[in-house]
Amino acid sequence: MTARAVSIWGSTGSIGTQAVDVILTHPDRFRVVTLTAHANGRLLLEQAKKLRPATAVLTGPAGDSDFWKRAFRENGTELLLGREGLLEAASRGAEQTVLNALVGSVGLEATLAAIRAGVSIALANKEVLVMAGDLVMREIRGRGLSIIPVDSEHSAVFQCLQGEDPASIRRILLTASGGPFLRTPASELTSVTPAQALAHPNWNMGRKVTIDSATLANKGLEVIEARWLFAVPPERIEVIVHPKSIIHSMVEFADGSVKAQLGVPDMRIPIGHALSHPERLAHDFGRLDFTRCGPLEFLPPDTERFPALKMAYQALAAGGTATAVYNAADEEAVGLFLSGSAGFTDIPRLLEAALNGVPNTADPDLAGILEADRRTRDFVRRLASKRESAS
């Protein structure tokens, strides 16, 4: 059987390293074309030695670029640098699947370049559809390509919909763990530290998505992404808190039937599904023991304590560049919180201020979306700086 060609963007991050684990578990089934990282050149080189890609990309500060180029060349791998290097690698095309595990908005331009080169996408970088869902899905459909979700929730919905008529969907139910502060009183959230917010009870994820899980902004981003992935209006996408993260999401159909996808909370399972679809490769990343799961609890989300989720629906209703503003404001606010320049409860405050303060552009093209992204980041940084000076 011919090995499937795969590129991993963001291979040194949380999703990327788990994708490498999946591929090394099935070395006969995958052939790696490209690996990319931001600044972790040493880990990228280690991965390249194991996977032997034709191309690697370092998008961030490379230090001695000649040293790194020689090191990768000795492995038989061409090293490209910077944003231009990522776009060049994305544009080369080939019959492959790109696993986009980049963090934040950086993946949008490269994703569009890959789609225009005829590449199908396995998407873990939810910001791509949050910022430009309409534009990206039009490009995908116009070229007859596929986009397969990697997020556990969207992977669950994708699996539940196999063989179903999309017109029969009544509701998509995205499950949320509730994060580490599910039962924390609102009065205590003002003193939350980054270390506390990064202590997710179930999942091993990157820093940004873990903070988003704690604020429920991650679920807001997922609602926006689901709207575009599955062509379902926002009012038919609901969030339900399920603390054990056993059911990854559900779909209710017109006849009242509900399908759910269950599994242990291990991202290698949805990663493997996205890379091998429509096959299911055999691997042992954990099995559910239903006799030990205990009761499965479900709760409504508390949008008073965690208003970022409510704001995502507001951004969707506003349309235009509002969801790009939501995304950029969240990225900046989370970065400020992690650096100690903002508090935990400042994250939704900055989000709300950006949605109200940054002008919304209807029906934007890529340039308009990127401009909204830039203006939002400037807005949030200025506002945070003023608040810090005032305090």
Image: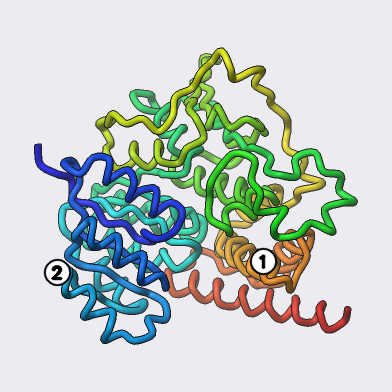
> In the image, residue 233 lies at what x, y percent?
54, 40
Looking at the rendered image, the quarter that the N terminus falls into is: top left
Residue type of the residue flagged with mark 1: Leu
Q: Would residue 297 be found to the left or right of residue 40 on screen?
A: right
Query: Which element carries disc 2, helix, strand or loop?
Result: loop
Q: Which residue is mark 2?
A: 76
Looking at the rendered image, the quarter that the C terminus falls into is: bottom right
Q: Would residue 51 be found to the left or right of residue 156 on screen?
A: left
Q: Residue at x 41, y 70 (%)?
A: 40
Q: Residue furthest left?
A: 1
Q: CA distance from mark 2 to mark 1?
A: 38 Å
Q: Is residue 317 visible?
A: no
Above/below status of 222 relative to 39 = above
Depth order, front residue of 127/242: 242
Q: Is residue 345 visible?
A: yes
Q: Residue at x 23, y 76 (%)?
A: 71
> In the image, residue 188 lies at what x, y percent?
87, 51
Q: Would residue 144 be found to the left or right of residue 94 on screen?
A: right
Say few, some or many: other residues with alpha carbon within 10 Å of mark 1 (under 14 / 14 to 19 / 20 or more). Answer: many
Above/below status of 229 relative to 337 = above
The residue mark sitting in front, 2 or 1, is: 2
Q: Which residue is mark 1?
A: 338
Lower sequence index among marks 2 and 1: 2
Above/below status of 187 relative to 360 = above
Q: Residue at x 43, y 37 (%)?
A: 155
Depth order, front residue of 105/53: 53
Instruction: Give the quadrant of residue 242.
Output: top right
Query: Which element carries disc 1, helix, strand or loop?
Result: helix
Above/below status of 281 relative to 228 = above
Depth order, front residue of 52/10: 52
